[in-house]
Image (spheres, rainbow, N blue to C red):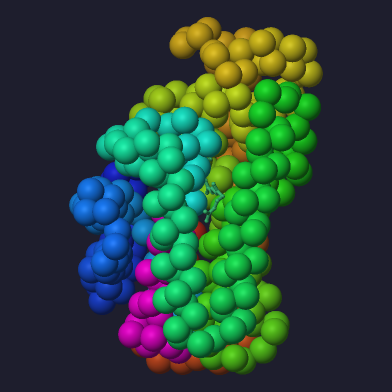
Amino acid sequence: MLRCVKPRVGALLLELMPADTAGLIQRLDLRVTSKNLPRAVENQLNDAFLVGGKKVRPALCFLMGQLMGLSAEKLTPYARAAELTHMASIAHDDVIDEADRRRNMPSLNSATSNAAAVLAGDLLLARVMSEISSLGNLLIIQDLANAVEDLVTGELLQLENRKKTDITFSALERVSSLKTGSLMSWCCTVGARLVNRSDELTHAAQLFGESLGIAFQMIDDILDFEVTSEKPFAQDLREGLVNFVVAELIHGDSTLASPVSKILGSPQPGVWPWTDEQLAIAKAEVRTKASERLADARKNLDTIRTLSGATGPSSDHALQSLEAVLSFLSLRIV
Ligand code: FPP
Ligand code: MG
């Protein structure tokens, strides 16, 4: 069965890529060096924080760009920028969530300090701005600035939702679209901006990334209630957050709102106000909605292929890989 702890997911995703793209992703240079940067911070970033990860966002940059007929060489700096932006957001996110673990390692904030982690995130973002600006495509820079604004807005909305149980499914979709979909959309639109084909192509690529991002978040929320997951069971509740699964539980039985509000932020392990059957039904509902989003993404893939007009083996392989990623994600939630 494909559902498994996260470190294996990265390896499985790589297996779905054409061998040359998988190699590019594995070898992607994420090192950040700077003359004046304290050595300890530089080492912490390059030897621990920036190492590993599923590299979903670089994969999206490469595959979408290749689908549109672009070379890997042209896409590589954008793939790097995508992962560094993601890691900047993670450095900040772990401070906000007071997380002490990331990728089965001490998080950057716990290995250093909250102040150092915030500053390291700022440094990564500044580096991305500088590197992307040097490539000279203003629309791509503007899109990335908008994506970062969306990331921040999504986090701010999520902050407002903390300790609340009356969160609608559509409000959670909005947060997911902003905090997960926005950067994925950027990765998908880089290729469209570079080939400069049409606004329609950019829009279709953006919708693909958004649907994928929302499905990704829904799957993450289902995995939050799996004992085999890398993270502690019900971590979102621990952080005071009603996620997609809990929203669905309350939607199915409104009497759960009050007991859920009492455990938000400090649930007792193994003591839940819902039955196993209620949890299974809620997870199944979220699975159905994630599958619908993945189906939407697949439809956009066909549109992107047609609009880009790209042909040839590299584009064919990228299309097959993107389809395989969607299938893999569907399997991951069965
Ligand atoms: C992980 O969410 C967090 C994000 C995907 C985005 C975080 C964005 C910010 C903190 C805004 C600042 C952005 C930048 C670029 C500096 P999660 O907590 O649900 O996932 P997790 O379980 O992996 O922590
Ligand atoms: Mg977090």
Q: Which of 41 and 309 is in front in this view?
A: 41
Is residue 242 found inside the magenta-colored segment of the image?
no
Q: Tell me the residue at 71%/49% (across/down).
A: 174
Residue that protrudes farthest toward the front in the picture? 36
Determine the residue positioned at 75% across, 42% down. Answer: 171
In the visual, does 322 lie left or right of 221? Answer: left
Say left or right for 282 vs 76: right
Q: Position of 303 compared to 49: left or right? A: right
Can the viewer see residue 194? yes
* Residue 128 in which image quadrant: bottom left
Residue drawn where x is 45% and y is 85% of the image: 135
Q: Where is residue 283 in the image (x, y as percent from the top left)?
A: 58, 31
Q: What stretch is highlighted in magenta?
A: 69-87
Above/below status of 164 relative to 77: above
Q: Which is the main secondary structure of the residues drawn in magenta? A: helix
Q: Which quadrant of the structure image shows residue 313?
A: bottom left
Where is residue 261 drawn, in percent x and y?
69, 16
